[in-house]
Image: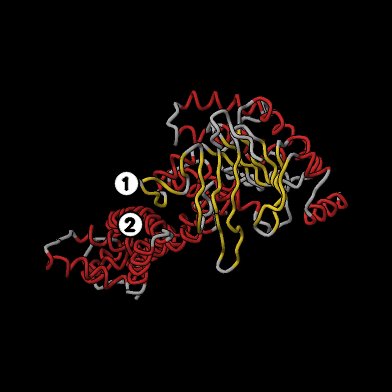
Amino acid sequence: MVWDWSYALSILPILAQASIVTIQATLLGFVLAATLGLLLAILRTSPLPIIAVPTGLVVEFIRSTPLLIQIFFLYFVFPEFGVTLDAFVAGVIALGVHYATYCSEVYRAGLEGVPRGQWEASTALNLSPFHTFRDVIIPQAIPPVIPALGNYFVALFKETPLLSAIAVMELMQRAKILGSQTFRYIEPITIAGAFFLVMSLIAAALIRYVERRIALRGIRP
Amino acid sequence: MTAPDSNGTPMVRFENVTKSYGSFVVLDGLDLEFGAGEKVAIIGPSGSGKTTVLRMLMTLERINDGIIWLDGEPLTHMERDGQLVPANAAHLRRQRGKIGMVFQHFNLFPHMNAVQNCMEAPVTVLRMPKAEARARACELLEMVGLGDKFNHYPGQLSGGQQQRVAIARALAMRPKVMLFDEVTSALDPELIGEVLNVIRKLGSELDLTMLMVTHQMGFAKEFADRVCFFHSGKICEQGPPEQIFGAPENERTKQFLSAVLEAT
């Protein structure tokens, strides 16, 4: 088995096309993970046990079951309950919800890191719980956890090949199909792997840049 | 003992208020009144419950028993069907608006500059237009002597300057009662004067009820209408500063004052 440059070049456009689906799934999935994760974290810090405890259970449940099973469940089992999802949509939701539970733990650490005096000052100024979170707590809770969120962003990206299990035409699925058509796996799989490597490195650099920007802006006492 | 306002209704009244953490009783059946416009210094050894008085009034701590009245209405309770029941969040928010508090550790919002710190609550709570809130914030910052620090973040200000921003921030909500909780205790000695000067200015220019927990005995003596000495969750002795500092009657007051004066 020798590397065939002409074959590699010929499949490059097809794989590039598929990589767009991978990037879309990553971005949409992470937007869902980041927003839902914050919501879960806030609910989990609620002083009302009736809110905090069920949220905690849901988070633990999702975190403790494999992502692949969740993807299958959304795509193959939900239709039995009358909810039929497009493969891409099911995949994005599964990725987003799964990573939301990880992100929620990260956010929780951030929220707990905000000094108690900030809550007390908010109460003394009569801010509503909504404004306290939006204007005082969240802006201080998020900057310190950006690196940890960034790690999950890259991790989510690298898990997108799982979507090939429900036939989403992302990079891995496309590479597999090319391989099975020509019985040449080395080129498509290598190119797919290289793509993940390059994109992960770019993402990591981007996260470091964002971190630095925030460090410059965040002036703390 | 208290100085009631013209209507005879005190601005703040603690009625048999008890606060405990587990089995540790911080305040034991406290009865205390503050008249409108009165300036009261609360002194006492640490752990005597003096800070808890302010924190309960700011609704940062729940009381275990008794009732606190504010401006002629119950604060910790509300009326329902002719009965007093524990206050709900809406009632607390309405009543809390009459009180402002300044903390020992400033508790400024570190991600907002001085003007933004003073605008946040007027804009979100009072729904004041931003331009108006900004103008008022600038006016208050001028008043506390920070006319040249509008756009500075807390991290760029000295402790004394931060505390003055915190005072302006509390005043922006137009409270009737201002609480000062050891506001100079975290400051370097050379910065204490500038904060006390601002408090002095508020006392003479604004019609505020001012309650301060303090270790600055000199300031308490000169500024307060009345001094309350707390010990073990109770008021041991209270009266005009001349009496408390000049001729204390209670043995504990004497001990405390001589210990404090020796240290300074």
Q: Is residue B215 positioned above or below A111 on the image?
A: above
Q: Is residue A84 positioned above or below B81 on the image?
A: below
Can residue A210 be seen by looking at this rendering?
no
Determine crowd level at label 1: few under 14, some 14-19, many 20+ residues with C-alpha closer than 10 A.
few
Quadrant assignment, res B29: bottom right
Residue B104 placement, left or right of B194? left
Given the image, what chain letter belongs to the residue carrying mark 1? B
Residue bearing the label numbered 1? B81
Residue B150 placement, left or right of A22? right
Separation of marks 2 and 1 at Cα, in angstroms: 52 Å
Given the image, what chain letter belongs to the residue carrying mark 2? A
How far from the left and from the top, in percent, is residue A75?
A: 19, 66
Residue B239 placement, left or right of B25? right
Q: Residue furthest bottom?
A: A1
How far from the left and from the top, in percent, is residue A47?
A: 42, 59
Q: Is residue A25 positioned above or below B247 on the image?
A: below
Identify the secondary structure beneath mark 2. helix
**Looking at the picture, which amino acid does disc 2 mark?**
Gly
Residue bearing the label numbered 2? A29
